[in-house]
């Protein structure tokens, strides 16, 4: 007689690593395939493994503590930092410049090297993945300084989406705030936040972005948070603001 299928106790190793703030679930799976993760003394070869209470998990030979409660921080990212834990070009990273005393954190999405403003940080990779998904409906808002002739009608047309170099971008809210000489400030809002999306879309409108500041991510605002500062979001506020399941 064939034994019935029994679900292993515990949780998948990639989810465990994500909740522990080691990496996103996808990056954790890549770390496992690369042989960087061990479970109870055995190097894992694939992510289809489960962690039970009391198991010993090592990443690069260092033990991983049991995940703490989920936490979220606001961080005012300065320009000139890359949003990665390791940069092959040796550029300074966000995580090298964080104030002391923070646990290991990962970012919710990214801001590129020359972008600045609000970056959310969390110790829970599963939360990061949830907040990055366009399905949450959260809008990311930016102040964008551009150089060139701004056509308000072309900006309004971005609400229908745009294709740039074969890539289709969804609806974008964009409006002219002020103009002085060749420079103008725009307000831009989007839900996807693909790699360098705003810069590529503006270039398609013959506008060169000279400054890009994220001022909000969903319900969380940059506000008056000083450049380089970090502030934890209260657990109660986080619970209240978490995206609700959508039909």
Image (spheres, helix red, strand yellow):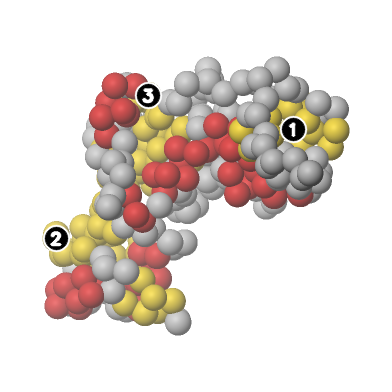
The residue tagged 1 is: 59
Percent from the top left, x then y, of residue 223? 24, 35
**Mark 3 = which residue?**
232
Residue 97 in sight from this viewpoint: no
Quarter of the N terminus within the rendering = top right
Q: Is residue 30 left or right of residue 156?
A: right
Counting residues from the start of the chain, the first of labels 1 and 3 encountered is 1
Q: Nearer the viewer, residue 122 or 205?
A: 122
- Within 10 angstroms of label 1, few (less than 14), some, or many (20 or more) residues? some
Residue 40 image position (x, y, % from top left): 81, 26
Q: Secondary structure at mark 2?
A: strand
Which residue in the structure is indicated by mark 2? 178
Between the C-alphas of marks 1 and 3, the distance is 27 Å
Res. 135 visible in picture: yes
Task: Quote the CA–CA distance across marks 3 and 2.
Answer: 33 Å
Q: Residue at x 32, y 29 (%)?
A: 238
User: Where's residue 78, x and y in %?
Assistant: 42, 41
Q: How many marks?
A: 3
């Amino acid at each position: 007689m064939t034994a019935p299928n029994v679900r292993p106790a515990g949780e998948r190793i990639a989810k465990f690593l994500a909740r522990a703030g080691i990496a996103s679930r996808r990056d954790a799976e890549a770390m496992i395939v690369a042989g960087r993760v061990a479970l109870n003394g055995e190097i894992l070869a694939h992510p289809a493994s489960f962690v039970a209470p009391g198991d010993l998990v090592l990443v690069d030979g260092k033990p991983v503590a049991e995940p703490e409660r989920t936490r979220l921080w606001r961080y005012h990212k300065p320009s000139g930092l890359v949003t990665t834990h390791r940069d092959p070009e040796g550029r300074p990273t966000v995580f090298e410049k964080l104030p002391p005393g923070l646990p290991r954190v990962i970012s919710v999405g990214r801001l590129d090297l020359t972008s600045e403003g609000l970056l959310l940080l969390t110790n829970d990779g599963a939360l990061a993945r949830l907040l990055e998904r366009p399905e949450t409906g959260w809008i990311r808002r930016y102040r964008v300084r551009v150089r060139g002739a701004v056509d308000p009608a072309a900006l309004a047309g971005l609400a229908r989406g745009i294709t740039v170099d074969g890539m289709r971008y969804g609806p974008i809210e964009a409006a002219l705030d002020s103009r002085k000489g060749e420079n103008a400030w725009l307000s831009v809002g989007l839900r996807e936040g693909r790699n360098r999306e705003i810069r590529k879309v503006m270039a398609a409108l013959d506008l060169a972005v000279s400054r890009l500041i994220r001022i909000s991510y969903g319900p969380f605002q940059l506000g008056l948070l000083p450049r380089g500062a970090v502030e934890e979001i209260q657990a109660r506020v986080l619970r209240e603001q978490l995206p609700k399941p959508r039909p």
